[in-house]
Amino acid sequence: MSAHSLPEHEAVWHSLEVNEAVELLGGNADTGLTSQEVDSRLQKFGTNELEESGGRGSWEILVDQFKNIMLLMLIAVAIISGVIDLLALQSGNLEPGEVPFKDTIAILAIVILNGILGYLQESRAEKALAALKKLSSPNVRVIRNGKLIDVEGKNLVPGDIMLLEAGVQVAADGRLIEQSNLQIRESALTGEAEAVNKRVETELPEETSLGDRINLVFQGTEVVQGRGKVLVTRTGMKTELGKIAEMLQSVETEDTPLQQRMTQLGNVLVSGSLALVALVIIIGLLRGGNLQELVEVSLSMAVAVVPEGLPAVITVTLALGTQRMVRHNALIRKLPAVETLGSVTTICSDKTGTLTQNKMVVQSVCTSQNILKVTGEGYAPDGDFEVDGQSIYVEDYPEVTPLLVPCAVCNDAVLQQEKGDWIILGDPTEGALVTLAGKAGIEQDQWNSKLPRVGEFPFSSERKRMSVICQVEQIDTGVSVIRDVDPAIGNLVKNNENYLMFTKGSPELILQRCTQIFAGNSAVELNQEQRGKILAENERMAGDGLRVLGFAYKPLSEQPPENSEEQYEQELVWLGLVGMLDAPRPEVRAAVNESREAGIRPVMITGDHQLTAKAIAKDLGIANSSDRVLIGQELQRMSDAELEKNVDDVSIYARVSPEHKLRIVQALQRCDKFVAMTGDGVNDAPALKQADIGIAMGITGTDVSKEASDMVLLDDNFATIVSATKEGRVVYTNIRRFIKYILGSNIGEVITIAAAPILLPMGGVPLSPLQILWMNLVTDGLPALALAVEPPEPDVMKRPPFSPKESIFARGLGWYMIRIGIIFAIITIILMNWAYFYTRPENAVAEGLDPERWKTMVFTTLCIAQMGHAIAIRSNNQLTIEINPFSNPYLLAAVVLTTILQLMLVYVPPLRAFFGTHVISLPELGICMGFSALMFVWVELEKIFFRIIGKKNV
Ligand code: ATP
């Protein structure tokens, strides 16, 4: 059936039989759609994407910008200033040449501009975060053109055959074709937390409610357990989830801790400035000052105290931080993680794939009779089996093939050759086993049809094992069905059983469930001595850092029902051990070292054997020989209080289950640790949510774990966590740096303005609101933006982490701001005092310059002094001459540009008229520059002083 004759109407899929459904959609359950068919269906049905709604609409984001108390205060200033101008206009008191309502218009323009900028930035940040989330959005495994491939979820079309496994988030609605133990959590749709057992065979009445349609799967729901094969029936907005898309909470827009603190800071600044304004007016009036002048001073102070540029700089810094992190393969899903990453004290990491390469190669096979060495590299099924250094034929060792057959069939991975390279689809541990079987000529496809799988008890990290139930081959001769057992496994079904169960998993666990051992050609009783030998061999392999799996089988005369694993995975027959090497990632050693120097403790948490874990941990420098390993079973017995006593010393947890991870995080957090935790499985989600920074694996992680995480490692690599931590520290340091820079200047401005009416007779207001806005936004804003991209200081990873709870003003920042603000004010006030008297009419007339130009000198000094401050503040401890001036070219550019702009305000007539400045002579400009330079000198002297007294600023 071609795409164009597909039913336009919506079929009631749950009331159809599977074949009917497949036929209706012109699909093929075995080979899937062809590429041409997919293309034409994409044209017809569109991509499988939800139009995101929900979250904040554009209008809401815009309105939110004006809810900020500082902007409200500016609006009030604009109105009052407008009223004053109006009164002046009415009474004809306007000064000659003065444009009425200039300040009002300028302030309102800034308020609107600030709102629009904030809006643009926030909506861009939301879009960027949404795009980042999409980057981590799942691929889907489908059958197309008769082959198994992974495609992007958005390219699914109705009629596709999609495969589901534990941990996957279902990418479209569909009708089940096959399933095994499939359980799906549908809380996203139904609100029901319990997972639903799915069934293929049922045809349900049309009126069946959504939650009871057990033969369908729905987009956005999560596979908790089992596997399934699904015919995609609906995609995009046609899915059940699409229908309720408005209810979707799309991108989460949490304020970062910093943004919250900034809101608080806003409140403090606004109330502080109102108090100060009241004080200045009262004192002024008591001293017989002019009310209008005092009101003007107050308005200027109110504008000066608000750091108008700060919110924008913070947003940009966080956004740039996420971009830099993604370039280093760390994808931030929740913005607060950017600034809190630097506070991590403990990184709890999985072993497999994060610390190791997850490229498994089987090295050793151990049966009841022999230990075989296996050669070969990668996943290519080329290599030899050796006994005592001699190559052997596997066929000569009758107990080896029965061990290698389950390697191929008790397995969900697929080995494929792509452009000459052998690659695996699925779990690398399983891939290595398919390769191992291939080396002995045991082809997976062939054996899957000889021993077709009729049931399974799936793997989970808790069970640490899996079983498949295979039917022993039946041949339909056309006359009758005869049983034809391959001689290689004939010995396993000596009593003519029709089914064989193969089990593989953690050797100790499998061995516990064995009562017999396969020895050559039959199963014999397993005695204590043999058990001891097997365990010793397991420990020997694990001690070499190998990941070891145990194999067993059980002949069955009937097919076990679903969920009967406890009953059937007993009294097994032991087959042997397989040990595979998963080499540590070479870059991790250096990363472990770096994290230690940075006061961050790496901890390994693995489901693997304690000796394997220890060998790898030792190799990587995470632990040394004397370090204790805490095993899942011990942990299980410990109370929370006992665990709390241990978490500080233990750096290796082995044979743990996902629920233990949650307890470990909680215990660490109770000991005041700030914990980053990795995870990949469905059941890791609670631990990832609990951790301060939950980290999911980009390559091997399940969709569910990604959904629960704050950050996704695109390369699954431990070293990436460490580099993201470093980036987090840099972001936080830079944020503190420009906050110091901006607020120090605000304090200086406020004090200078407040001092003017007190110190200068008939002085008036040195700075107009417009000029203050210019300083706060442009002359402070541009260098602050450049400081946000300041490269890391050399010691950023040589110091312990700072508490995430510390106030932004901690470690001397608040004191620095006040101190610098006062120095800034003293320098400017001295200049103001001198300039005021120097520019009095008698001097001014002589030079033909405006007597009011002392105000422009104050304005210029405040701006230029900040340029020196920006250069000096680049480092807390290094002197400016010790830093490469070109290591932050943006700052150089910002300083030059800002200085030019400032001079233009004084020397370009239209700008001068608009900003109300006056020409100053070159010597006067030189004096302003000289005073400005004092600021730079002061900050440098402070660094020298702190160096002498041996105090390091951080
Ligand atoms: P990590 O937690 O560091 O990733 P891990 O991969 O060993 O370590 P799990 O995937 O939870 O952790 O596996 C736990 C144990 O289960 C393994 O050590 C192994 O003994 C067993 N195991 C792993 N994969 C399979 C599998 N596909 N089939 C059967 N048993 C398995």
Image (spheres, helix red, strand yellow):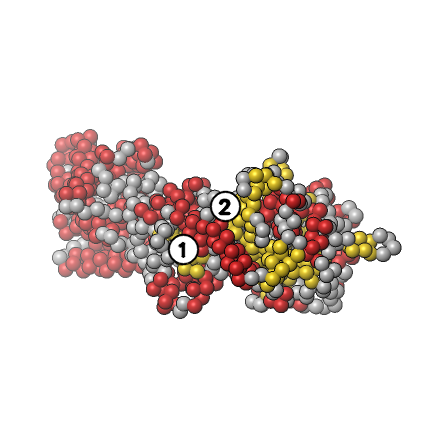
Q: Position of residue 894 (x, y in %)?
A: 32, 36
Residue where numbered disc 1 is placed: 652
Crowding at mark 1 (Cα within 10 Å: few <14, some 14-19, many 20+): many
Q: Nearer the viewer, residue 204 or 386?
A: 386
Spatial CA span between label 2 and label 1: 17 Å
Please state which of residues 360 and 412 is positioned toward the viewer in this rendering. 360
| Number of marks drawn | 2
**How many other residues sit within 10 Å of disc 2, few (<14), some (14-19) or many (≥20)?**
many
Name the amino acid type tagged 1: Ile
Rendered image quadrant of residue 443: top right
Numbered disc 1: secondary structure? strand
Vertical side of 506 occupied by 381: above or below:
above
Q: Earlier in the sequence, mark 2 or mark 1?
A: 2
Is residue 166 visible to the viewer in this orientation of the structure?
no
Viewer-proximal residue among 789 and 580 = 580
Residue named by callout 2: 582
Q: Secondary structure at mark 2?
A: loop
Residue at the far right: name it.
479
Residue 389 pos. (x, y %): 54, 39
- Residue 33 position, x and y percent, is 72, 46
| Image side of residue 278 versus residue 107, left or right | left
